[in-house]
Amino acid sequence: MATAGKIIKCKAAVCWGANKPLTIEEIEVAPPKDHEVRIKIVATGICRSDEHVLSGAFAGVKFPIILGHEGAGIVESVGSSVTGIKPGDKVIPLFVPQCGECRSCLNPESNLCYKGFLGKCDGTTNENSSRFTCKGMAVHSFFGTSTFTEYTVVDDISVAKIHEDAPLDKVCLIACGFSTGYGSAINTAKVKPGSSCAVFGLGGVGLSVVIGCKVAGASKIIGIDIDSNKFARALECGATECINPKDYDRPINEVLAEKTHDGLDYSFEVIGNIGVMESAVSSTHFACGTTIIVGVAPSNAKMTLNPMMFLTGRTLKGSSFGGWKSKDHVPKLVNDYMNKKFSMDKLITHKLPLEKINEGFKLLCSGQSVRTVLML
Ligand code: PAD
Ligand code: ZN
Ligand code: ZN
């Protein structure tokens, strides 16, 4: 491409601090260094985790920063030593990298690569510096992806090449929300055919858990949300019934125990609320129930659970990015979507240009949207 090796000037939504609106700015994006890839972002979803930064809930974030980790785009140029990816390829930037060498990457049962954001909160590239500047200032990158910009630079361990015909305005959700929910059912819980499941929280990630439970063959999928407006969509995604805890004057675990012959096989917490996590555990069957935590709780939060609940045979697990090994599995998930193994169409409620990004966050916070996809 004509821009290879040169600084690119482009538009980006810059976040200057917690609780401040994003502003659309002209930024400079430096060429990719060794083992880095520069990508033209085409579409990106707005995820709750981006909003957590905006509302100040994420510790360790440095400003100014370009958020966004649910994007898809086309490679513009690659740095030296990059193999398997070339300009023109369709790609998904990965907020969970896969270095292939660390203990997590080598273990077939785990997916949180040591080189990911859990090890470095400001989500910078390999060299711990970003490739963005704005008004002469360095701008940090987020989760190693930064997709709220026309161009971004990521590490080669943080990008997956996908099918050349993949619709980027849909498969961008595979970068986070969809894969997280779907994989927590398929990989982490390993939901069995004929089983009973409950999903607490029916946002974009929760609905993706519902889709995963359905694909896995669960016979009962109960959606739970305090916002009954979420129910119609949950039923369309595969929930067999939906309940609102506000409609009951007794604990929801008692209601669920009655509906499921003493308790669920699987429950999923997809909100980030400690009280709901405790209910999700007590809603499962005492001897064979499994709970998966997907929601991100505040960093200082503590759960209170009686050990007897686990002595009887319950299991409690957590799931990040649905347990997928990102570089290996993201291209397969894209192919599965294209082969119609599952649909994500119900998850996208709004499409907006990048300029309307603040409106997109408002739609998420007011519960009006499931996923807004920004088109760049
Ligand atoms: P969302 O805000 O769109 O959906 C949350 C849903 O929960 C909404 O429908 C709310 O009405 C509902 N809700 C809120 N409080 C309650 C309550 N007390 N009882 C029942 N329902 C309630 O968020 P999302 O679907 O985008 O994300 C959900 C969580 O998943 C959030 O915590 C996010 O940070 C987390 C997440 N985790 C990962 C991961 O890798 N583990 C990845 C992406 C997102
Ligand atoms: Zn996310
Ligand atoms: Zn690794």
Image (tube, grey):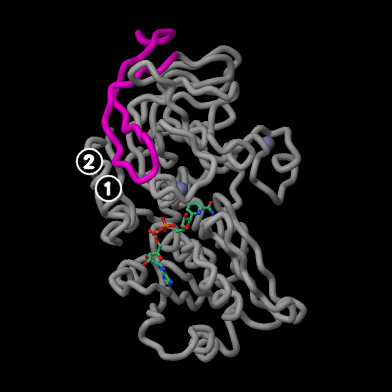
Above or below, 133 against 247 in this view is above
Answer with left or right where residue 226 lies relative to residue 336: left
Whether label 1 touches label 2, CB < 8 Å? yes
Q: CA distance from mark 1 to mark 2?
A: 7 Å
Total marks in image: 2
Question: Tag 2's secondary structure?
Answer: helix
Which residue in the protein does label 2 denote?
356
Residue in view at x 33 percent, y 21 percent: 27
Q: Report the magenta residues as a range.
A: 1-30
Locate the N terminus and report the quarter of the image it occupies.
Answer: top left
Q: Is residue 222 left or right of residue 150?
A: right
> Per the image, is 14 magenta?
yes
Q: Is mark 2 within 8 Å of ligand 1?
A: no
Determine the quadrant in which ligand 3 lies: top right
Q: Based on the displayed image, in which of its 4 quarters is residue 347 positioned?
A: bottom left
Residue underneath mark 1:
360
Q: Answer few, some or many: residues within 10 Å of disc 2's Cα (few below 14, many 20 plus, some between 14 and 19).
A: some
Name which residue lies at 58% across and 25% down. 128
Mark yes or no: residue 374 visible.
yes
- Check mark 1 vs ligand 1: CB closer than 8 Å? yes or no: no
Q: Position of residue 106 (x, y in %)?
A: 74, 40
Q: Amino acid at mark 1?
A: Gly
Depth order, front residue of 302/124? 302
